[in-house]
Image: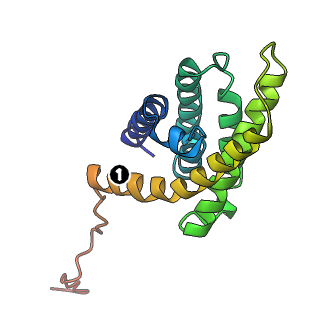
Amino acid sequence: MNWLHTVLLLGVTFLVVFLETTWNGPRSLLGAQVDLLPSLVIYTSLSSGPVALALVALLGGLWFDAMSANPLGLSILPLFAVGFWLQYYRGLILRDQLFAQWVLGFGASAAAPVLTLLLLLNTEKQPLLGWFSLWQWLVMAILGGLFTPVWFLVLDWLMRALSYREVESSSFRPDREIKRGRS
């Protein structure tokens, strides 16, 4: 895409991490932390190139880890792995279908915490795991899946609103008459 799309994605990534870490309403209501970064990575991998995907995964993971109990940089690899896998198969994915967006968001929001947990188990940190962790994982996956189509609607609308469409014009006008032969 262009630089405006990348800057818009990075701004939304920062805003999402900020709201996830400061707004406690969904956490106290559902009993689970809502993580919307995997669903934003889905949108980025299907709408942008690998540079924007790497920036969203890198900066989003660093910002999220800076505000959580995770070791710094732990969330980068799961976000990038999910996004890179989708980027590789993006020609086969129905990007504009709401059901496909929901399934991809659900899968990514379910896979990213599991990959993060596997990485966390290989560090010296001991995560708190129990039966309630299954509930938290399910809530994160469902809400991530439900929010993925919202990214496609809102961010595509913002890109159309903030950028211009190129005029498709030809050098031949339809009202022009071409005379052949001698004049």
User: How many numbered marks, from 0 up?
Assistant: 1
Residue under label 1: 159
Q: Nearer the viewer, residue 11 or 110?
A: 110
Q: Nearer the viewer, residue 101 or 179?
A: 101
**Residue 28 position within the rendered picture, expressed as x and y whole percent measured from the top left:** 52, 38
Q: Is residue 62 visible?
A: yes
- Residue depicted at x 70% and y 39%: 112
- Residue depicted at x 42% and y 59%: 153
Q: Quadrant of residue 119?
A: top right
Q: Please, which residue is most extreme toward the top here?
A: 124
The secondary element bearing badge 1 is classed as helix
Q: Please, which residue is most extreme toward the right here?
A: 122
**Residue 122 position within the rendered picture, expressed as x and y whole percent measured from the top left:** 84, 20
**Residue 81 position within the rendered picture, expressed as x and y whole percent measured from the top left:** 72, 38
Q: Nearer the viewer, residue 31 or 63?
A: 31
- Residue depicted at x 69% and y 63%: 92
Q: Quadrant of residue 157?
A: bottom left
Residue type of the residue flagged with mark 1:
Met
- Residue depicted at x 63% and y 54%: 142
10 Å crowding of disc 1: few (<14), some (14-19), many (20+) = few
Q: Using the image, determine if residue 169 lies above or below residue 22.
A: below
Q: Using the image, determine if residue 41 lies above or below residue 14.
A: below
